[in-house]
Each structure stands twice: as structure tokens, then as C-alpha cells.
Image (cartoon, helix red, strand yellow):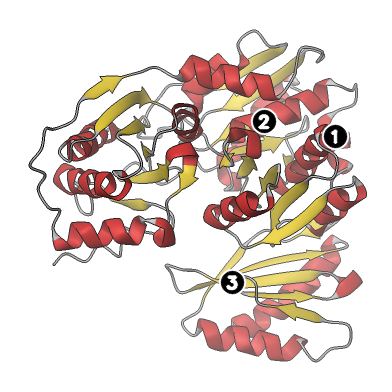
Amino acid sequence: MTDLSAIVKAYDIRGVVGADLDEKLVADFGAAFALLIKPDSPTVVVGHDMRDSSPGLAAAFARGVTSQGLDVVSIGLASTDELYFASGALNMPGAMFTASHNPARYNGIKLCRAGAAPVGQDSGLAEIRDTVEQGVPEFAGQTGTVTERDVLADYADHLRTLVDLTGSRPLTVVVDAGNGMGGLTVPRVFDGLPIRVVPLYFELDGTFPNHEANPLDPANLVDLQAKVREVGADLGLAFDGDADRCFVVDENGDPVSPSAITALVAVRELAKEPGATIIHNLITSKAVAELVAEHGGNPVRTRVGHSFIKETMARTNAIFGGEHSAHYYFRDFWRADTGMLAALHVLAALGEQDGPLSALAADYTRYAASGEINSTVEDQAGRMAAVRKAFESRDGVGVDDLDGLTVDLGDAGWFNLRASNTEPLLRLNVEAPDEASVRSLTDEVLAIVRG
């Protein structure tokens, strides 16, 4: 029996093409997915990114689905949030072939049920893995069919109904697509808006010849920052490979934290629906919950990870949710994450007033932060216990275990220490009133973590 635990992750299937994934295995995954969702849906929508391996793997998956008697609607080249749109608008389960920001040799499958409901380890992935490992049973009935459908225009039109930019002042925006799917979706979504786009790396190229399509790595923002300054743009946007995440830099080329974007979008959504619930994961800035409460909303804190965000959004009927990793979730987008919709909110907010983005972002930024700091640690539980022991007995300190270890030092700041699910790493995030306090607290925690 083949052990697939190394590639069937918490939220998706991902591995190196040729070594971990090939068309035969992917066809089995398609058949197993069909068996999982067959009682609820006769059709699966399938999309893929621009990686060289993606069209072949997507076609193999479709063969697996149709081998079990279900039909496939292929939307071809698409961003991940475009696939979520198709799943929601067509009310079909979906499969997206992408490895997001991973290097070119990787690929993977993001799965969802009808309405873009997530499929993770506890909601179908483990069952799919078991079916493939045990051998997919053959289906004796008639095989399904594959039809093609272009949903890009409908996707763009839907996003534009959710954010009104008709009254915006003209803006100049540098967009770095990183040779990923933003090169396809941005021109269509921004077409006709009062926005002049200065494109960087819009050519679809799954070898990523210019830089990795991971905007959370500062090295991958250098070109965007330089171009924003060169052309005097109002802001810059960087998308990851499958264009479901969007990172923002201001007119000076300085990064705007995803927490500030979360707070900005939350305030805008609360203006449409006063008193609504807003979800934020426990690594976003403390300012997010403060600003949500100050604007009459109900902030709800959750664990890191899209399955937890979406589950909590469904349970609370939250209107919006944001993560520190630049994933943004919208109730009006089937609770799925879409960086494009967050970008439209930022553009609308900026275009409604005359000041620069740096001043606007400052309204949603109250604290200094370390960013995520990784430490290679074999004894993760032991090191976390040592950190807990060092802090929990101090006066006025609060400790919780919602996701790893969170230590609240009141006005002095807070930190979260989490173990990686896949590597011998501890991940540290620190927030405090100023940079000096962040450095001091970070040094104190890391001294314990790293011994």
C-alpha cells in the first residue's frame, strides 16, 4: 500500500511532479473525489494554473472523475479564486491545480465542495487518501463527459458588483503578477475602471523566470517597490502564483501589513452591515479586533488556516475574515478567499479620498510587529513548555492554547509560538507598542526557544 501522507496535507494535495505526483495517481485522486461527492453532485468543475504540468494533471483528474460516471466542466486557465467563483456560481464541487507560491517542480490540488466549501483533512481529504491507498473501485456504469466553459468575464463582473469604484479618483497601480495567474485575471477585472495599470511579469510562465511568486518574502517585492517609486504610482499590488493572495505596498514602496488591510476592509464591510461579525486569526494585529469593536462590529478570533476561518464564518455568519498571510475571505464570495476583492477594496478606499496610501494605512496600524520568525527545534513541546513556564507566573500575564501558545503581556505586547505541522519548526510572532519593545520581547523568547 502506498503511503500518501507526505503529499496529502492539511488543506490540499501537494508534491513534486514526477517524484510525488503523476497523471496516474492524479486520475485516482479524481476518481476518489468523485466517490466522495457523488451523493451530492453529478458534476465537478476543474481549473488549473500556468505551470507546465497543470494541463496534463487537470485532464488526468477529469478522466478519474468521469470514470466514476460524473461529468466535468473544465474552466481551463484560472486563478484559485476564479475556481472558487465557479464552484459557488455553478453550485458544483471543484478542483484547482496549483502549487500556489511553490517552485516550478511542484504542483497540487485544492478541492472544494459545491459552494466553495473547503475540503480538508477532517472534511474529505483523509477519506480521499484512504480510497486511493486501498485502491479505487471500478465503476461499471457509463462514463461521464467533459465540457469546456469560460467563466473569467463572469468572475470579474461579480467582483465588480461587490466594490464600487465608479466614483474613485484616477489611480496609478503597479501590479506584479509574478508570471502567475494574476497576469490573466487583473486585466479583465480592472478593465474600464479609473485605474492605470503598470504591469510587471504578466506573461504566464510556470517556471517563474523573474522571481518566486510568493509576495510574503520581501525579496520578491523588490522589483515592485522599485517600479512604484520609478513611476510615482499610488500603490503596488503583488499576487502569488495562483492569485488568491494579494500583498500591498504604498506610494513609497513600503509594505502595508495584511493586518492593516484586514482592518481596512473590515471597517468598509461594517459600514455596509453595521454590527456584523468579523473573523481574524490569532496572529493578526491586536488593532484588528480593536478597530472592529470601535466601528460597532463583533470581532471573533480563530486559529490559523483557511478551514478554521471558513468554518467559523459559516457558524457566525461573519461578513469578512482576514489572516496575517494575506488571505482574505468574504461572505459574499461564498466565504472563500480572494486577494483580488481585497485589492479592489483598497483601491476604492484610496480613491474615495485625496491622501496617500501611507496615511490611509496609518489609520489602521497601531503597533509594531516582528513578522513570523522560524526556529528549527527538535523538541517542540519541550521548548514551548519552557517558554510557558518563563511567562505564565508573571503578574498580569494571560496565556491561552487556541493555536500553539499565546502569551498576552497587556500593554507590553503579546506573542504567539506555534509548531509547524510538517517540519521541526517553531514559528514566533511578536507584537508590541514599538520596535524596541518588539526586539526586546523577541530576543527574550528566542533565547528560550533556541536554548
User: Looking at the picture, how far across and down is residue 436, in whole percent?
Assistant: 84, 66
Q: Are marks 3 and 1 in contact (CB under 8 Å)?
A: no
Query: Between tags 3 and 1, which lies in front?
Result: 1
Does any portion of residue 37 appear in the rendered image?
yes
Query: Between tags 1 and 2, which lies in front?
Result: 1
The secondary element bearing badge 2 is classed as helix
User: Looking at the picture, how far across and down is residue 222, in whole percent?
Assistant: 61, 37
Quarter of the image where one finds residue 92: top left
Farthest top residue? 192
Q: Are marks 1 and 2 in contact (CB under 8 Å)?
A: no
For residue 242, side relative to residue 402 (left or right): left
Q: Earlier in the sequence, mark 3 or mark 1?
A: 1
Instruction: Specify the label residue 418 is tagged with.
Output: 3
Q: Amino acid at mark 1?
A: Ala
Give me the C-alpha separation between circle 3 and circle 1. 34 Å
Quarter of the image where one finds residue 444: bottom right
Q: Closer to the camera, 252 or 68? A: 68
For residue 53, side relative to residue 407 (left or right): left
Q: In the rendered image, which residue does mark 2 sit on?
A: 343
Does any portion of residue 7 appear in the rendered image?
no
**Residue at image coords 67%, 30%:** 343
Q: Amino acid at mark 3?
A: Arg
How many other residues sit within 10 Å of disc 3, few (<14), some (14-19) or many (≥20)? many
Q: In the rendered image, which residue does mark 1 sit on?
A: 271
